[in-house]
Amino acid sequence: MDSERSEFPFPFTPYTIQSEFMKSLYSALESGSLAIMESPTGTGKSMSLICGAVAWLKDFEARELERLESLSSLQSEESSSSADGDWFNAQSKLIEKKQEADAAKKALKDIREQLHEISLYQSKLKKAKEYAEIRHRAKTISTNPEVDVSDLELLLLDGDVPLHEEKEDEREEKSRLPKIFYCSRTHSQLAQFVSEIKKSPYAKDLRVITLGSRQNYCVNEDVLSLKSNNLINEKCLQLRQNKPPSGPTPGKKQKREHCPFGCNASGLESLHMTAMTEVLDVEDLVKLGKKEGACPYYSAKASVDDAQVVVAPYNILLLKESREAYGIDLKGNVVIIDEAHNLLETESSIHSVEVSFTQVKCAQSQLTQYLEKYKSKLSPANLLKVRQLLQVLGRLLSVIGDKSKGEAELAFTMDEFLDKSELIDFNLMELVSFAERSRLAQKLNGFTIRFNPTLEFSSTAATSAPAPTTGLQGFLSKLNQSKASPAILEAVAAKPTILESGVGINPILQVLGLLKKLTCRTESGRVVSRQGSIKFLLLNPGSMFADVIGEARAVVLAGGTMKPTWDVRHELFNDSDRIVEHSFGHVVPAENILPMVLSSAPSPCTFDFSFECRSNRDMIKALGRTLSNISAIVPNGMVVFFPSNKYLDQVFKVWKEEGLDKSIEKQKKLFKEPDASSQVERVLKEYAFYCKPSAETAAFRNGAILLSVVGGRLSEGINFSDELGRCVVVVGLPYPNSKSAELQAKMEYQRTKFKSVSLGKDPGSEYYNNLCMKAVNQCIGRAIRHRNDYAAMILLDRRYEAQHVKSALPGWIENNLTICKNFGSAFSALRKFFGEKKSKSG
């Protein structure tokens, strides 16, 4: 089969770039490449991924079955001995052929059995639908779980063992046809991808399953009421194992010790059967699970083996322990990671842990009071471990307490931090193992729920009885006696709802997560100590991705804005010779976009929003006048991105003092990105309302303008298509804070690790620049969302004229970029652009 397949099943006639995308994807999967594929948002990337990848999968399956059929039919041929001594070689070749034929027969048998089972699912489901609807089996479950348990359930016992997934009977390893593992960042993105599969030509002939957490899939209200993902996992495992009560109290009701959804074998089979014959997303499977009275989570896990396409969020695929828990084997399979522009940052975040002052204090308080209540009932060994953990918590608090004088945040190597904090005196691995084995976090949570202990905040591991002062005021009183800095005390006092909403419920989990990271002692690990928290940071996320690259047949990173790709090539793919890179144009015609660099204002003022210059009041006023003039030309909606919240607030304050906000509002209704995430939806709805002309919005004849922040709530994942975004303005270059200890540690690591491949460039600076330009590219990509869309993109800073900055822009922007040295030329270009669009629409 030619790796350059020319035609692909598609729900409509594909655009040229979609055909090119599918051809390149097909070729990458066929050759086992590490592919970086950039296709702008709005170009039908998801459908191209589906049709290109599934076409390859179907072709590969057909060829593999044909190959196995051919090999398995080989017959051993007699070989006569010859005088020249070839008999031995001939027999050796016959044996090798026979072994190869036997292996092929077994593989073919395994695959046929799998396909036969799936055929049975389809047959059973068809009959079920013909004769009756699937019977409603959902059980009525109390929404108020019993919490009246005996002390035995809260005690740390020497015989405790951590709960794990039940191991299925050992099964003989079977040959399987390859799968496609598709992952993206959020469940909404995964649901959208599954929705696209349903629209594709493969909808009726593809086995798809979506994986998710228990929190996403659980239909047992008792378990879901626990809220915390860790507690839900623990409770689910406990119910799954159907343990008998561990110390019943006569006359008192016990918690339910099994889950009717997880134990419903026939319902689980029906769910699995339906999932393998229909394309379902998480919501579909949950609805069906409630109807069947069966667990969607375990049904989804059981379907991995039979699925052709497995859809999963980042964390399930990127974490090795998660892949093992879900039974995912990447060997010989294809991995497609969508929305991969921030994959390195996501990988780093997944493997990083941060604990706050308040979390450590709460954990210390709970553990101190737990010890006070149960110390006479604990074994000497467990008593010792609990006291050692309290000492560790005390030392962590001392490290955070050292920041009370307001010093800059600091980054330490693992050894430096362990030495500074004096944690090197403890066997942290042993303490973490003890906590996991004894299920300390879960028992401490049960203790807290049952007894609602006073929040004691002694800075030492005291074991005295709790003071009588209770509630938030008692907590603040104790906190004031601690080593906490004034800034921490002010923050806690200002936000009491953080404590009231459950920070103190099970904080030991986060602390144990940090201690577990500290046992790794990896050279690319750093500990950042800042005012109010301690964070473990993984500097080389690529090291955790090596398993994926090593096992998978091919890995595809796809995104709307993948440039710059330096870090992906060097850090994630380690300069492998398997790397291929493709950047595709936009489906939108060139005449529908107007990307420009604007270096100066209407008044004689050069735009330079570097950190040293951005506070210049005259330049801030010039920015307001420039946006006011632009808003007079741009119809409908206009989105302006600022480098940070702090700078947006500073600019807005100057505008109000100078009356420039009123000048802008003569043209467009002015909106500002809200501080609270709960207000985002409301602001977006109001903004959208004013973007479209109507009698009610006539006072703002040119629509609305939305002031947003790069990397904020509106820079990713929100589409400003059509009237919502006729113009996107990026103010300055959004470089991150170079004084951040976290960023400095990362840049220094880059310099050390990639010096040999930097070709004379500073790897640390390259990393720093890439962070900035990826953020810019995300903002630019918010506007153009489909072929008939049109918009102007204005990069407001003279530094955008630099070649290294321009080359980091998406190809479809760079190729059409106009450099405007003065405002007059930019104003004329904008007037012409929107004038032509208005005349065409008119």
Image (cartoon, helix red, strand yellow):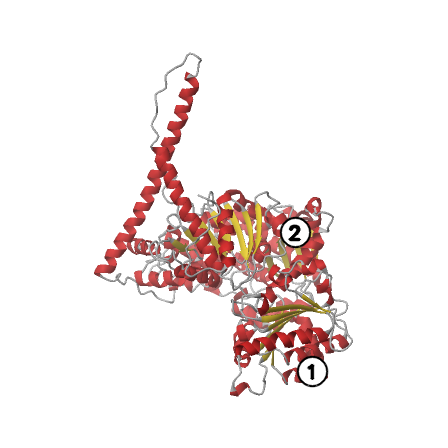
Give above or below for 612 relative to 175. Answer: below
Crowding at mark 1 (Cα within 10 Å: few <14, some 14-19, many 20+): many
Question: The N terminus lies in which quarter of the figure?
Answer: top left
Q: Quadrant of residue 294?
A: bottom left
The total number of labels drawn is 2
Left or right placement of residue 661 versus residue 550 in this view: right
Q: Quadrant of residue 456?
A: bottom right
Residue 552 in view in this figure: no
Which is nearer the eye, 316 or 771?
A: 771
Residue 755 in view in this figure: yes
**Amino acid type of the residue tagged 2 in the rendering:** Arg
Which is nearer the eye, 596 or 387?
A: 596
Q: Which residue is mark 2?
A: 526
Q: Position of residue 393 (x, y in %)?
A: 61, 56
Which is nearer the eye, 732 or 440?
A: 732
- Of labels 1 and 2, earlier in sequence is 2
Query: Helix or strand or loop: what does disc 2 sit on?
Result: strand
Q: Which mark is residue 201?
A: none
Q: Position of residue 681 (x, y in %)?
A: 52, 74
**Amino acid type of the residue tagged 1 in the rendering:** Leu
Q: Which residue is mark 1?
A: 660
Q: Position of residue 505 (x, y in %)?
A: 51, 63
Give above or below for 794 relative to 695. Answer: above
